[in-house]
Image (cartoon, rainbow, N blue to C red):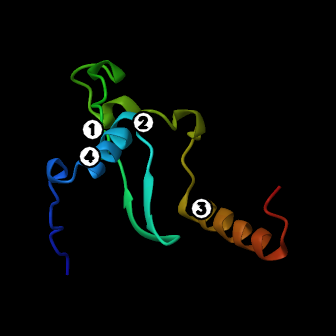
């Protein structure tokens, strides 16, 4: 179960406001301690994520269109028959069991 954090207006606590400004300016965390015991941590808010530039991919092309044919170099001239596929699979399993890794 999540609970809402109770806000503290730093304008009502001038000493705290100074540390808050420092954390915002430096983007570095600060520990708040009492008698050498951590009681709180001031953490800068997350930076807003920058959107990717629309130039990262050509306009109008989906990710599928961009990656179409990416494995073309691995294509066989003739597809394997079901029997050849089974033999290749069995050989791969046998190699793995034997610890050779196939190569």
Identify which residue is drawn at 73% across, 67% down.
Answer: 91
Measure the C-alpha gap from mark 2 to mark 3: 60 Å
What residue would you read off at disc 1?
Answer: 48
How would you rate the neighbour count of disc 3 (Cα within 10 Å): few for under 14, some for 14-19, many for 20 or more?
A: few
How would you rate the neighbour count of disc 1 (Cα within 10 Å): few for under 14, some for 14-19, many for 20 or more?
A: few
Identify which residue is drawn at 15% across, 61% down.
Answer: 7
What residue would you read off at disc 3?
Answer: 85
What residue would you read off at disc 2?
Answer: 26
Measure the C-alpha gap from mark 4 to mark 1: 22 Å
**x%, y% of residue 27?**
40, 39
Q: Nearer the viewer, residue 14 or 97?
A: 14
What residue would you read off at disc 4?
Answer: 17
Mark 1: secondary structure: loop
Identify which residue is drawn at 27% across, 31% down.
Answer: 51
Mark 2: secondary structure: helix
Camera-side mark, 2 or 3: 2
Task: Please identify the quarter of the rendering in which residue 69 is found.
Answer: top left
Q: Earlier in the sequence, mark 4 or mark 1?
A: 4
Mark 3: secondary structure: helix
**x%, y% of residue 79?**
54, 47
């Amino acid at each position: 179960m999540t609970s809402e954090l109770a806000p503290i207006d730093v304008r009502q606590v001038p000493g705290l406001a100074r540390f808050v400004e420092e954390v915002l300016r430096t983007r570095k965390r600060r520990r708040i301690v009492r008698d050498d015991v951590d009681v709180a941590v001031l953490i800068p808010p997350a930076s807003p994520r920058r959107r990717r530039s629309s130039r990262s991919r050509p306009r109008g092309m989906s990710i599928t269109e961009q990656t179409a044919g990416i494995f073309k170099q691995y294509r066989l001239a003739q597809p394997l028959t079901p029997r050849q596929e089974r033999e290749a699979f069995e050989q791969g399993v046998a190699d793995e069991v034997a610890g050779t890794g196939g190569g």
